[in-house]
Image (cartoon, helix red, strand yellow):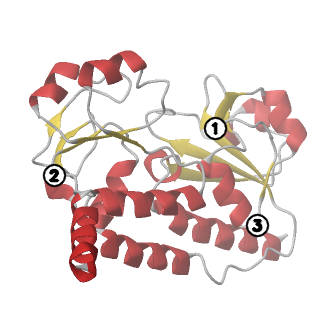
């Protein structure tokens, strides 16, 4: 009898965690993790400009999701991002189970990998992926000098990455220091603040948030700066996904090379 009850308990536990089969992604950064888990076939809806899901239907943007299209897809899980865009009104209208994907650092990305692995029934794949990502940032070399970094999110208005962002976590893990410290993900700053911070390395992104910036080294306001300028892809650096781990390695090499040459 005891054995029967034990088997029954295990069976019920298994059925209580049913893997999602029809998923809509409203947090574009989560797309990369889902690809790495090999769960693309379970995605039925994605936001505009999220590539790699050829069988999924566009459901608007993460800022303005199309509720009617989402309903028509009959999803059993919504992966959402920042709560301020996914309002209580939208939650009520859809009445679908949600998972919030909004990591600010590498540790939270690893947590999301584990969570999504469970959601998609890919726990073993998630475990392998987590180990691989941890290995990717092992063996970092501590820079032999202090490297101050400014990260330009947008030129006009001038926006910087704050300390509560994936960018800041990557810089710090790689051995660098953010010159502008504000406990936000992104915030508006001024040229005077940038100049006063005397960055050794000025990183600027290219992408939807910073479409056609004038290269910083060509701007008159920065003529007095003695910085190295590095251009990066916004989709690689500002989206909190598995790319962050290889970016830490890239930045660590960049900082170490800077110290060797200065």
Q: Is label 2 in a helix, a strand or a loop?
A: loop
Q: Earlier in the sequence, mark 2 or mark 1?
A: 2
Q: Residues within 10 Å of mark 3 (few under 14, many from 20)?
A: many
Q: Residue at x 21, y 29 (%)?
A: 59
87, above or below 120, in the image: above
Cα distance in 3D space between marks 2 and 3:
41 Å
Q: Nearer the viewer, mark 2 or mark 1?
A: 2
Q: Position of residue 101 (x, y in %)?
A: 44, 45
CB atoms of marks 2 and 3 within 8 Å: no
Q: Earlier in the sequence, mark 3 or mark 1?
A: 3
Q: Residues within 10 Å of mark 1 (few under 14, many from 20)?
A: some
Residue that mark 2 sits on: 21
Comparing 47 with 189, the one in front is 47
Residue 38 showing in the rendered view: no
Quarter holding the C terminus?
bottom right
Comparing 18 with 130, the one in front is 18
110, above or below 102, in the image: below
The label number, if any, that marks residue 77 in the structure image: none
Q: Is residue 135 left or right of residue 183?
A: left
220, above or below 174, in the image: above
Q: Is residue 42 left or right of residue 161?
A: left
The label number, if any, that marks residue 185 in the structure image: 1
Residue 199 showing in the rendered view: yes
Cα distance in 3D space between marks 3 and 1:
19 Å
Q: Residue at x 76, y 68 (%)?
A: 258
Quarter holding the N terminus?
bottom left
Q: Is label 1 in a helix, a strand or a loop?
A: loop
Residue that mark 3 sits on: 175
Comparing 10 with 69, the one in front is 10
């Amino acid at each position: 009898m005891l054995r029967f009850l034990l088997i029954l308990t295990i069976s019920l536990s298994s059925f209580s965690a049913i893997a999602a089969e029809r998923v809509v992604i409203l947090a574009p950064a989560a797309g990369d993790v889902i690809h790495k888990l090999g769960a693309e076939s379970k995605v039925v809806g994605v936001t505009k400009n999220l590539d790699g899901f050829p069988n999924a239907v566009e459901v608007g943007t993460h800022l303005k999701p199309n509720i009617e299209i989402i309903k028509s897809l009959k999803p059993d899980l919504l992966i959402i991002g920042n709560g301020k865009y996914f309002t209580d009104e939208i939650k009520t209208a859809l009445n679908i189970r949600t998972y919030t994907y909004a990591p600010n650092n590498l540790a939270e990305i690893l947590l999301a990998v584990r969570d999504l692995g469970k959601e998609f029934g890919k726990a073993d794949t998630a475990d392998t992926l987590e180990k691989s990502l941890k290995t990717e940032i092992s063996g970092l070399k501590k820079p032999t000098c202090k490297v101050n970094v400014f990260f330009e999110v947008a030129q006009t208005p001038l926006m910087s990455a704050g300390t509560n962002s994936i960018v800041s976590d990557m810089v710090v893990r790689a051995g660098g220091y953010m010159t502008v410290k504000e406990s936000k993900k992104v915030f508006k700053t001024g040229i005077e603040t940038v100049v006063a911070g005397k960055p050794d390395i000025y990183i600027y992104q290219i992408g939807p948030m910073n479409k056609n910036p004038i290269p910083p080294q060509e701007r008159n306001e920065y003529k007095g700066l003695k910085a190295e300028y590095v251009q990066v892809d916004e989709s690689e650096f500002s989206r909190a996904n598995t790319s962050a781990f290889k970016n830490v390695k890239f930045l660590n090499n960049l900082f170490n090379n800077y110290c060797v040459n200065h």
